[in-house]
Image: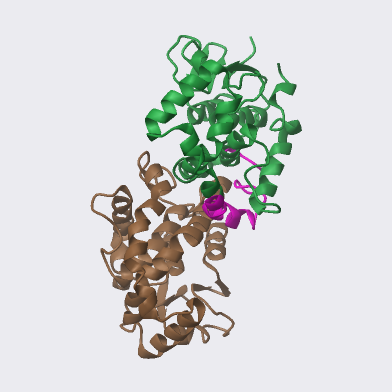
Chain colours: A green, B brown
């Protein structure tokens, strides 16, 4: 039975926009593991497998089912030791965790504002209603009012990416000479916005933009179209 | 011949305040290598060894002399393979580089402002004159005007440390279950301000403050008094 990766998707069943799912898509590709991408809407998450999940990714791998991207990445590396390692040792696990913390605390708040309307617009109408209610409750304002802050967030993004830019000035990948899970963590985070609205994040010839393009080229360009294989 | 580590120091010859030297003090301790700490003033840096250095740390190790903290750390790990590793593999090198980039781009600008007058006040009068001229030229304002921004920088520091706080909520050290060079990189950066004026950086019971205290306790508490050993 082929591995199944449940992935939050737009109404067209093609635009996979969850940052955390993208981390696992890249991890599965890196580890040369076959999988089937199962698109789900927000409304369908509670029906995945035994119904105990409230977020994606969820991976079914034979008799094993698990959620939380970092746990899935660790599981894949520990279970499939004969395919390429995605962490490069204990230090690489710590690196990926720090990149994850950086993405969550520094980038996510900006990206959530930048992407809010594009994200809304690619959803099914049921998901749109759910998303609007949940976000408006969390932020205490309408989606449209949130979106008014998008330009300001886009303006501070280059500064927020300064630690990444500084690092990528000296090496091609966050992880060193080859990409690994730390790269996929940042890639997934930015890919979220890129799927919602391509070419909307970076200034031309930014070192970070060039790295992002290299990520999009990995694994036969799966970042450009995840629906073109393994379906 | 014992190893020599040249270290920028206050007029009292005891307060070693260079962030980059602290990284190497901790690295040498971690690797269980003997060394002598040689205090130098700004004015004496150009007279270290063959006179080709413009910054510290500089390490003399037998016939080898080298500068730049990251290069020294790599050299120590590659040369002394039988003592504890300070990087935990390729991933750990990448982690330390990312922490270094984060410190340089996110923390240094704030800390340079927070520490400016305390740093000035612990120097010899010759160094004070040099430091004042160099900083006033670089920032286009007097040291006293720079220092007026210290409270504002101290106020944003907790937010700037958010990625570290998020990570340390789940593990004791940046590097995982034991400290390594990524920890020493951030520690050195913050120790710079701590040496200039103790207990001036953190709010009480901050997760980051607790981690910093654990760093100060390492290696018989060398972070609390580097002059008490190996001189």
Given residues B25 and A191, the one toward you in this image is A191
User: Which contiguous range is marked in magenta?
Assistant: A155-181
Q: Residue at x 34, y 68 (%)?
A: B150
- Using the rendered image of the protein, determine whether residue A180 is visible from the camera's viewpoint: yes
Q: Establish if B137 lies above or below A123.
A: below
Q: Quadrant of residue A167?
A: bottom right
- Using the rendered image of the protein, determine whether residue B92 is visible from the camera's viewpoint: no
Q: Establish if B94 lies above or below A225.
A: below
Q: Residue at x 62, y 32 (%)?
A: A196
Residue B205 pos. (x, y %) = 24, 49
Q: Is residue A178 magenta?
A: yes
Q: Establish if B14 lies above or below B181.
A: below
Give the side of residue B126 with respect to residue A228, left or right.
left
Residue B50 pos. (x, y %) = 58, 84
Number of numbered discs overlaid on the protein picture: 0
Q: Quadrant of residue A225?
A: top right
Residue B41 pos. (x, y %) = 42, 83
Give the side of residue B102 with respect to residue A32, left or right.
left
Q: Is residue B34 magenta?
A: no
Instruction: Single out the residue that lies furthest toward the left.
Output: B204
Instruction: Identify the image quadrant of the C terminus of chain B.
Output: bottom left
Given residues A59 and B115, the one toward you in this image is B115
Residue A25 pos. (x, y %) = 62, 27
Q: Residue at x 49, y 55 (%)?
A: B102
Given residues B179 and A179, the one toward you in this image is A179
Q: Residue at x 28, y 49 (%)?
A: B206
Instruction: Single out the residue that lies furthest toward the bottom.
Output: B126
Given residues B25 and B174, the one toward you in this image is B174
């Amino acid at each position: 039975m082929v591995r199944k990766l449940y992935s939050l998707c737009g109404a067209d069943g093609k635009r996979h926009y969850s940052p955390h799912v993208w981390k696992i898509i890249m991890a599965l590709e890196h580890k040369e593991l076959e999988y089937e991408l199962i698109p789900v809407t927000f409304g369908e998450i509670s029906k995945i497998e035994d119904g105990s999940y409230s977020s994606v990714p969820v991976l079914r791998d034979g008799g094993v089912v698990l959620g939380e991207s970092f746990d899935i990445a660790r599981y894949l590396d520990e279970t499939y030791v004969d395919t390429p390692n995605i962490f490069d040792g204990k230090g690489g696990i710590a690196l990926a965790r720090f990149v994850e913390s950086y993405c969550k605390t520094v980038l996510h708040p900006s990206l959530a504002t930048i992407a809010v309307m594009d994200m809304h617009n690619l959803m099914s109408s049921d998901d749109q209603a759910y998303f609007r209610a949940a976000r408006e409750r969390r932020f205490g304002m309408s989606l449209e009012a949130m979106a008014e802050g998008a330009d300001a967030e886009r303006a501070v993004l280059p500064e927020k990416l300064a630690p990444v830019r500084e690092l990528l000035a000296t090496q091609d990948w966050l992880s060193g000479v080859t990409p690994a899970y730390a790269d996929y963590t940042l890639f997934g985070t930015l890919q979220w916005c890129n799927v919602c609205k391509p070419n909307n994040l970076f200034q031309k010839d930014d070192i970070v933009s060039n790295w992002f393009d290299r990520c999009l080229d990995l694994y036969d360009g799966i970042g450009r179209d995840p629906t073109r294989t393994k379906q």
